[in-house]
Image (cartoon, rainbow, N blue to C red):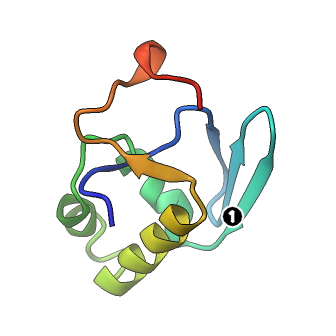
Amino acid sequence: MFLKPRFRASFDVAVVKPRLLFLLDEHRQVILEGESFPLLVPFLDGQHTVAEIVARLQGRLSFTQVVAALNQLENRGYVVEGANAPTGESAAFF
């Protein structure tokens, strides 16, 4: 698992409904359903550790729910390591 996960720079991320998240890039459109994914969005910017994310979501998601959702995002290639990575316009588009 990544230390400070963030969405790939190529994705436009949109929370459409409380349980629905869209990830869009020039090659694919991904729809993720479930309570966990939209709640994680504000913290997947490469600035928060997994422990910080778990702490911030305490009372809304359990440790297990956070880790399971992050594992799904990582295994599918939707998030990458964000620690010391360029962000915004300086990030590579891939």
- x then y, percent, for residue 46: 32, 42
Quarter of the image with the C terminus in it: top right
Q: As drawn, is 19 to the left or to the right of 86?
A: right
In the image, is residue 77 above or below residue 11? below
Q: Residue at x 31, y 67 (%)?
A: 57
Front-most of residues 60 and 27: 27
Question: Quick one: label 1, few (<14), some, or many (20+) residues within 10 Å?
Answer: some
The quadrant of the picture occupied by the N terminus is bottom left
- Nearer to us in this view, 2 or 88: 2
Task: Choose top left, top right, bottom left or bottom right for residue 59.
Answer: bottom left
Q: How many marks?
A: 1
- Residue beneath disc 1: 32
Q: Is residue 78 above or below residue 93?
A: below
**Which residue is at the front of the view, 65 or 74?**
74
Which is nearer the eye, 77 or 15? Answer: 77
- In this picture, residue 7 sits left or right of residue 32: left
At 26% from the left edge and 73% from the top edge, which residue is drawn? 58
Give the image quarter of residue 86.
Answer: top left
Q: Is residue 85 above or below residue 6?
A: above
Residue 50 picture location, percent across and down: 25, 63
Where, by quadrant of the figure, is residue 82 drawn? Answer: top left
The three-letter amino acid code for the residue at tag 1 is: Leu
**Residue located at (44% from left, 67% from top):** 70
Image point 60% across, 64% down: which residue?
A: 76
Q: Position of residue 53 (x, y in %)?
A: 27, 61
Q: In the picture provided, is 57 more to the left or to the right than 40? A: left
Q: Secondary structure at mark 1?
A: strand
